Image (cartoon, coloured by chain):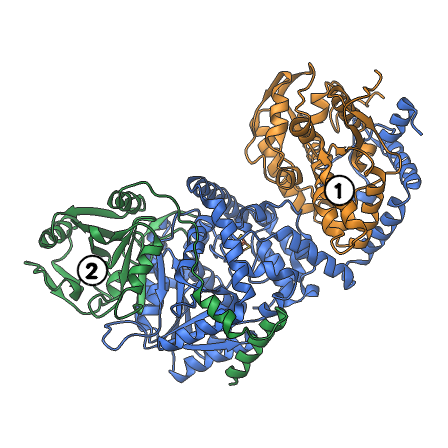
Chain colours: A orange, B green, C blue
Amino acid sequence: MTETPTRGPRVGLFATCLMNVFRPNVGFSAVKLLEDAGCTVEVPANQTCCGQPGYNSGDYDAARALARQVIEAFEHYDYIVGPSGSCMATIRHDYPVLFQNDDVWRPRAQALSEKSWELLSFLADVLHAAPADARYDGTVTYHDSCSGLRGLGIKGQPRALLGEVDGLKLKEMEDSEVCCGFGGTFCVKYPEISEKMVEDKVRNILASGADTLVGGDLGCLMNIAGRLKRIHAPVKVFHTAEVLAGLADGPGLAGAAKEAD
Amino acid sequence: MSTSNARDAILGSVRNALRRGPLDDTRRAELDARVPRHTRPAQGEDLVARFIRKFESRAGTTARVASRADVPAAVEAYRAGKGLPARAAVGAALQDLAFPGLEIHHGAAGVSEMLSVSQALAGIAEPGSLMMASGPASPITHNFVPDDHVVVLDAGAIVGHFEEAWAVLRARAEGMPRATNIISGPSRTADVEQTIQLGAHGPRRVHVIIVG
Amino acid sequence: MEIRSKEFKDRAVFAIHDASLQQALGKARGGFVGKRAQQAAELPEFEQLREEAKNTKNHILDHLDHYLERYEAAVTAAGGHVHWARDAEEARKIILDICQRVDAKTVTKGKSMVSEEIGLNEALIDNGMEVIETDLGEYIIQLAHEPPSHIIAPAVHKTKDQVSDLFEAAHGGPRKTEVPDLVNEARMVLRDKYFRADVGITGGNFLVAETGSSIIVTNEGNGDLTQTLAKVHIVTSGIERVVPTLDDATLFLRLLARSATGQETETYTTISTGPRRADDLDGPEEYHVVLVDNGRSKMLAGRFKDMLRCIRCGACMNHCPVYGAVGGHAYGWVYPGPMGSVLTPLIKGLDNAYDLPNACTLNGRCASVCPVKIPLPDLLRELRHMQHQQDLTPVMQKRALKVWRYVATRPKLYHALEQVGARVLSAIARNGSIRRLPLASGWTDVRDLPAPAGRTFLELWQGKRGQK
Ligand code: SF4
C-alpha cells in the first residue's frame, strides 16, 4: 500500500453491513478509488449499521439509536462516504427527519447529512475523478438501484465512470429503473412477490445480452446474483466500484471460485 | 335524516383537524378574492392550426369553410360521404341555416338518431377540443347519442388555453350552462385489453366544420 | 364491499400463479408507463405543474371548510342539492332515500370509486333496483361479480377471452371474439339502459366552488349518457375533491389524463351545474351531490394529510412493481396499489390491512410519478411505525428487531457476530453460493445466497492497515 496523501479530504468510509460480511472486495475497491482521487480514507471501528432496517420496519427508536452511533463515529470527518445508495440515502434524508423534534441531535444529523455521499456520486460530483486506467473486458448492463436513483439522483454518474473503463461495453437493459424485488426485509417477508419481481429483472438482464451486471447496492446485487445463480444464468455480478477500481478480476457475487483475500 | 347534523359534524371535524375554528370574514374575503395563476403550457402555434392538429390526432375529422352559408353544403358532403340517411337532429342554434334535402328537427336526440349537427360555443386550441354549452338551442343528447356528430365551430371562437374558455363561460349573461361538454374526439374505450376502440358509448365519429 | 385485505399474502400468491391474470397485467403495464412518460416529456411544464398542483391542493386542504361551504352555496344557487355523509352507511342511506322517493327501478352508474367505497350497488340491489354499471370496464366486472382491480381501468385484469365468455353468458351470444364486436355489443345493450334509467349516478373528479359544478372526465361518454338521460343525477364524491375555481380545476386536468392513461386529454370533460333548466330539452330534473367524509376529515389532522391530495389517477399503481406482480384484487378492498395501501388501513383500520403497508420495497417509483407529489413510501413507512407502536407487528419480527438493536448498538459484539456469520456461511457454501438455509428460507426458496469470502471487510482492513 502506498502512503496516504496528506492533503485532500479526510473521508470516513461507511462499511455497510452487507459489504462487510459478503463482499469485502467492494470496501477495498472503494478505498482504492477514494485514495486514487486524493482522499485520506479511514474506517472507524465503532460503526455498525445505518439503522435503515429499524426505520423501515417502523421502529423509529431503534433507528435513532443506530443513527446516533453513526453520527458520533463519523461527524469529525470531512465526508462520510459509502458504497450504497440505500444506506447513504438513509443518512442523508432520513436522519434529519428522525431527529426533527430533537434540538440536540437535529443539528448534528443535519451536519452529517450534508457531508454524506454515495461513493460514485462523490467521485463524480464532488471529486470530479475518473477511474485510473481500469480495464474490464466485457459487456456490462447497469441496474439502477431505487434509493440511489430516486433518493440521491444517481443515474448518469456511474454510467459516465463506467464509460471510461477500457474494454468495457455498456448495454442498457429494458426497465433498468424498476425495482429488483429486494427491498430489505421485503424479500423474505414476501418471497413470492419478490421472486416475480427479480424474475422480471433477470429476464431484462438476459435480454440485454450483457455478460456482466453491475450496480451500486449490494442488497439488490445479491438478490439478482442469487436469482441468476438459481436459474444457472451465466451472468457475472459486480458492484460498480469493483469494476472501476480494476478489482473485478475474481469471481462475481455468487460466482464459483472463492475470493482470495 | 340528519344531514344538517352530518354537515356540521364534518365541517367541525375538518376544523378540528386543522386546529382552528371557522375562518373570520377577513380571511374568507381574501380567499374569495384569490386569483389562481397557474402555469399555462406555452403555445407558439396558430390557434386554428393547433386545434386541427390536436383534434385530428385523436381520430376526429375537420373541414374548413369560408362562411356560415357554406355549412349546409359541408354537412351534406359529410352525410353523403358516410352514406347516412338524410335525417338529422340539428341544434336550434343553427336554425338560421336551411338544410335542403335534409329532414331536420330541433328536438332532443332519441335512441335511433344517426346524425346530429351542433354549434360549438368555443374551441380550445391547447388540447384541440370543442366546448359545447347545453341549452334549448343545443341539447346535450346531440353530443352523445347519434353515431355521427357534426359540430360547427367559428374559427374566431377558438381560444388558446382552458382559462380563456372559462372566461367565455363567465361572460355569458345566462351564467353557467347546465352541462358544459368539452369534447376532444369520438368516444373511445381501452377497457378490453388496452385496445383502443372508437364509439364506446358516444359518437363513433366527430366531424368539425370550422367556419372562417 | 367486504374488506379482504387480511388475506393479502394468499391472494398475492394466487394472483402470481394465475396465468391469464399475468397475461393481462403484462399487457397493461408497458402501455401505461410508456405513454405517461411520453406525455410528460412532451409537456416541458409538466414538473412545474406537479409542484403547483401539490401546493394548490395543500392550500385547498388548509381551507377545506371554507371551500366546501362556498361550493355548497353555489350548488344550491344553481338549483342542486348537497348532502353530507359522515360515513359509508350515511351515504348509502341518502342515495337510497333519493332513489326510493322517485320510485327508481333502473339506476345507471358512471365509474365512481366513492360508490365502491361506500358499497352502494349492494344497497340498491338489495332494495329491488336494477343497477347497471356503464363504464365498459365496470360493466365487465359487474357481469363477473368482481370488484374493480384498478381505479381507472377496472377490468384491466381480464383478458379478451374472458370478456367474450362473460358477454356470451350475459347477452346470449353468438359469441364475439374481436374487440370491436365486443365493444359494440356492450354499446347496444347499454344504450337501452340509459334511456330507461330513473337515476344516474356518477362520481366527481372535481367539485368547483366558484360555480357549484361537478366535473367528470371520461373517454367513453358513458358518464354523460348516464347523467343526461336519467331523471335524477346523483354525484358521489369525497369532501377533498373540491377546488376553488375552474382555473384551479384546469391545473389538475392538465395532469390527470397524462398521468392516468398517458393521454393528453381524455375524450370528455364534462362540467355539470345543477338540474335541467326551464327551457332545456334534455338533462336530469334533479341534481344531487353527496359529499362523503368516511375518514377523510380525520386524515387531515396529521401526517396523512398529504394523501388527501390524491386525484385518483392510478399512476402510482401503473408504476408499482408489486401491483404489477399481483394485480389489484390481492389488496382486498376498493383501492389497490400504493395509494390503496395508504388509504385502506386509514379508512378500514390498521389491523384489517397489516400487509398492505409492508408489502412494498419502498422503491419510490410511485412518488416519482404522482402528479400531486404524494410521498407514498414515507406514508407507508409511517403506517408501519403506527403498527409498531400499536403492537400490531408480528411477535417474531418484534423480537428480531429487539435483538438486532441490542447487537447493532454494540459494535464489538456486532463485528464478532458478523465474523462468525461470514465464516459459517462461507464454510457451508458450494460453488460460491448457498442453495438452502433453513433459517432464511424466505431468501433461499427463491434464490441462492451469494457466499461471503470468509473474513469480513473490517477484519481484513484492520489486518492490512493495522488501525486501532
Ligand atoms: S396517489 Fe398520486 S399517483 Fe396515486 S392515484 Fe393518487 S394522485 Fe395518482
The three-letter code of the residue at mark 1 reads: Ala
Q: Nearer the viewer, mark 1 or mark 2?
A: 1
Q: Are marks 1 and 2 on the same chain?
A: no
At horizontal 69% and vertical 58% (from top left) the residue drawn is: C383
Residue A161 can be seen in this image: yes
Position of B141 with respect to C322 (left or right) is: left
For the residue carrying disc 2, how many other residues have a C-alpha within 10 Å: few (<14), some (14-19), or many (20+)?
Answer: many
Residue C173 can be seen in this image: no
Residue nearest the viewer, comparing B37 with C202: B37
Position of C62 with respect to C178 (left or right) is: right
Residue highlighted by disc 1? A111
- Among the 4 quarters of the image, the one containing residue C193: bottom left
The numbered mark 2 sits on a residue in which chain?
B
Q: Secondary structure at mark 1?
A: helix
The numbered mark 1 sits on a residue in which chain?
A
Residue nearest the viewer, comparing A134 with C242: C242
At horizontal 74% and vertical 60% (from top left) the residue drawn is: C387
Residue nearest the viewer, comparing C24 with B155: B155
Residue A68: x %, y % from top left: 83, 46
| Residue C229 in the image: above or below residue C268 | below
Mark 2 vs ligand 1: CB under 8 Å? no
Residue highlighted by disc 2? B118
- Among the 4 quarters of the image, the one containing residue C165: bottom left
At horizontal 75% and vertical 51% (from top left) the residue drawn is: A98
Residue nearest the viewer, comparing B4 with C457: B4
Q: Which residue in the rendered view is the most extreme toward the left?
A: B100
Q: Quadrant location of the C terminus of chain A?
A: top right
| Residue A260 in the image: above or below residue C325 | above
The three-letter code of the residue at mark 2 reads: Ser
